[in-house]
Every structure is written in C-alpha cells, then in structure tokens.
C-alpha cells in the first residue's frame, strides 16, 4: 500500500513511522526541513493533567498518548540512536492568589474523582520540591505523571527513525490532491504526479492551504507562540512549572524554556518586544532568581488552532484522504496517539479510541 503524507513535522513523521512499520510504502512531502516549524518551536510539555479542561474525549486522547510515550521513546531511540530528553518528573501548577488556589483545588479533586494521580500542595511543600520557585507561592497542584521531552531532539530522532524504516522524504510544494474515480489517489508536487492509495494531510497551521483537503484556512489557522530560552550552569528545576499565565520547562543541560504567547497574526513568525516582555515578566514571577541568567535564544512558532481546541483526526471528505491537524498546543504530546489512530484508519483497522469527536466536519469548526 502506497501512502503519501503531506507535512514532515513531528506528527507527519510519527504517522509515517507507524505506517512504515506496518508494511506500507510511505513518502513524506515537506516544503522545508522536517520538523522546522511548530515541532521545533514547541516546549515539549507532555501534560494532559496540568492542561486539562475536564473529563471528556480530549482528556482521554491525551492520557492515551502520554501512556504511549515511554514505548514510543524507546522505539525511536532503538531506530535512531538519539536520546530525546524524556523526563517523567511531573508538573507543578503554581498559585499566587486565593482564587487561583481554589481553581486548582477543584481541578485536583475532580481528577482524583476519576482515578488520576494529583495532589494539592501548600507553599512549604512546593518549595521543598522546587526551591527555586518564588517564595510567595501559596500552593500548587502536583501532577506527578505528567512529563516533558526535548522536542527538537525528538523530531530529529523520529524523522531519522522513519527514514531508517523505509520512509522516503521529498522536498516540494503540494499544488493539489489528485482525485481518481471519486477518491484521492495521490498529490501533485510542483507539477509532478505522485500517486498513492491514501494521502494523509498533516500540514499543521498550513493545512487549510492544501488544495482539496476539505479544511479551510478558517477551520485551522495559525496561532503564534513566542518563546525564550535561558541558561544556567546547573538545572534549576526538576519539573515543568506552570502558572495561570505560562510555564518554565527545564532541560537536562541547564537550559530553561519560558513561554508563551497566544497571538493571531496570520503567518507572521516575528518575535516582538511585547511578547518578550510578557514572557520574561512571567518567568521572573515564577522564579525571581532567574533575573541574572543569560537569554540565549528567542523564537516564535505557529501552532494549528481550531475554535474548539480539538484536533482533526481521521478520514477526510473523500475516500483515500485522511487528516491529522489542529493539535494546537498539544502536537508534541499527541504525536504517538495520532500516529496510532491514523495508521489504524489508513489500514482500515478498528480504532483504539473513537475518532467521532475529532471529525473534520464536526459542529463548532465548520
């Protein structure tokens, strides 16, 4: 079975890897370097509980993907030889006011009621776990099973693992989907026909610009997020640290990522003075001791946003067309489960989770 995947970010590469391992002949079409867009611009947070808006299909999807991560990381390491900085060290969501603390109290109670591991800590307990946190902290929700990964290393490793599993990568611009006898039968890449039994569009924020995919630029649109990287001699945190406004993500080598912004400025990826001011103010609120650390890198990425904040997964409007987009802030987290579900859909296998909540034509985004 020949499959073409449009988009070589982490999601596209993960789908390609899973299909190739199942015996498919897979080609990834990427207009740039694989993983050069949102996959490399992200923070690598794997936090379905810390970012949960409550029980439902999306939380189930995220929890399934988090559960797949250890095996996914081991598989990718074995194929690529690249360690990806997977840290199953937990996440703290800090509260600096009574209203925020009460929201966390409710969230922890709700998650515990459905069997998830979560606890509410007082300020002293928080500082015992993370001494670099602002001593004004009043408490925190602790989600010990949430995690993080170095997403830049991950996308490099997954693309290499896919290539070593037989996936072919070609550079080019998809001008159109090929329709043959009422079904999608390939793509037009810069005027050349590339035929296939199935096409998976995993083009991130650019999904709506792929002609014929059935998703409009209004359904999936770019949401800019700016980021700052700081550096310390030794790691200052063991865990990802959240507040209501943003987060700090530690790396094993002492780098610390601070983010982020949410801006709708089309496809402009500029880093702005206002964005940096917001992120650095947030970082210093979380940990005032960061004030003298050097800023070593700043960047911006475009996340694929949908109005209901749910991804688009599964069959598209024509037979032979499949969609994997709209992951917004959870593309890194959702890569393993997206690969699993899309491979099942392409190969006509029963899905491990229902795809109905993530249809391309669901109410709320059409």
Image (cartoon, grey):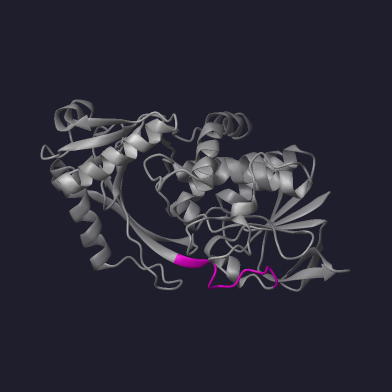
Total numbered circles: 0
| Magenta region, residue range | 212-222
Q: Is residue 247 left or right of residue 281?
A: right
The residue positioned 29% from the left and 47% from the top of the image is 247
Q: Position of residue 327 (x, y in %)?
A: 52, 54
Q: Is residue 141 above or below residue 184?
A: above
Q: Is residue 220 left or right of residue 145?
A: right
Q: Position of residue 11 (x, y in %)?
A: 58, 50
The residue positioned 25% from the left and 61% from the top of the image is 276
In depth, the one of 88 and 17 nearer the eye is 88
Q: Position of residue 225 (x, y in %)?
A: 37, 60
Q: Is residue 179 visible?
A: yes
The residue positioned 48% from the left and 41% from the top of the image is 153
Q: Is residue 155 visible?
A: no
In depth, the one of 32 and 314 nearer the eye is 314
Q: Is residue 213 magenta?
A: yes
Quarter of image, res 137: top left
In depth, the one of 225 and 162 nearer the eye is 225
């Amino acid at each position: 079975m020949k499959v073409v995947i449009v988009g070589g970010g982490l999601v596209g590469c993960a789908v390609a890897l899973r299909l190739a391992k199942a015996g498919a002949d897979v080609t990834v079409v990427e207009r740039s370097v694989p993983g050069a867009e949102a996959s490399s611009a992200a923070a690598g947070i794997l936090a379905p509980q810390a970012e949960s808006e409550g029980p439902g299909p999306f939380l189930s999807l995220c929890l399934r993907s988090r559960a797949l991560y250890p095996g996914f990381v081991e598989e990718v390491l074995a194929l690529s030889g690249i360690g990806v900085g997977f840290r199953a060290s937990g996440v703290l969501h800090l509260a600096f006011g009574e209203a925020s603390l009460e929201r966390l109290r409710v969230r922890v109670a709700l998650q515990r009621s459905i069997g998830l591991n979560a606890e509410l800590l007082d300020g002293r307990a928080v500082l015992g776990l993370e001494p670099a946190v602002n001593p004004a902290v009043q408490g925190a929700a602790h989600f010990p099973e949430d995690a993080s990964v170095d997403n830049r290393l991950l996308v490099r490793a997954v693309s290499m693992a896919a290539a070593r599993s037989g996936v072919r990568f070609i550079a080019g611009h998809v001008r159109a989907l090929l329709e043959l006898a009422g079904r999608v039968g390939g793509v037009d890449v810069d005027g050349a026909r590339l035929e296939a039994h199935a096409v998976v569009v995993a083009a991130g924020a650019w999904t709506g610009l792929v002609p014929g995919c059935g998703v409009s630029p209004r359904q999936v649109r770019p949401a800019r997020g700016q980021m700052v990287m700081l550096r310390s001699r030794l790691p200052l945190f063991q865990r990802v640290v959240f507040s209501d406004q943003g987060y700090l993500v530690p790396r094993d080598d002492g780098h610390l990522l601070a983010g982020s912004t949410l801006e709708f400025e089309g496809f402009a990826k500029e880093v702005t003075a206002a964005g940096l001011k917001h992120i650095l103010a947030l970082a210093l609120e979380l940990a005032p001791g960061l004030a003298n650390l050097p800023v070593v890198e700043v960047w911006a990425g475009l996340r694929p946003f949908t109005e209901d904040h749910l991804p688009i997964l599964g069959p598209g409007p024509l037979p032979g067309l499949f969609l994997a987009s709209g992951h917004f802030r959870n593309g890194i987290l959702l890569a393993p489960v997206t690969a699993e579900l899309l491979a099942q859909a392409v190969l006509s296998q029963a899905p491990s989770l229902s795809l109905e909540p993530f249809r391309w034509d669901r109410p709320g985004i059409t």
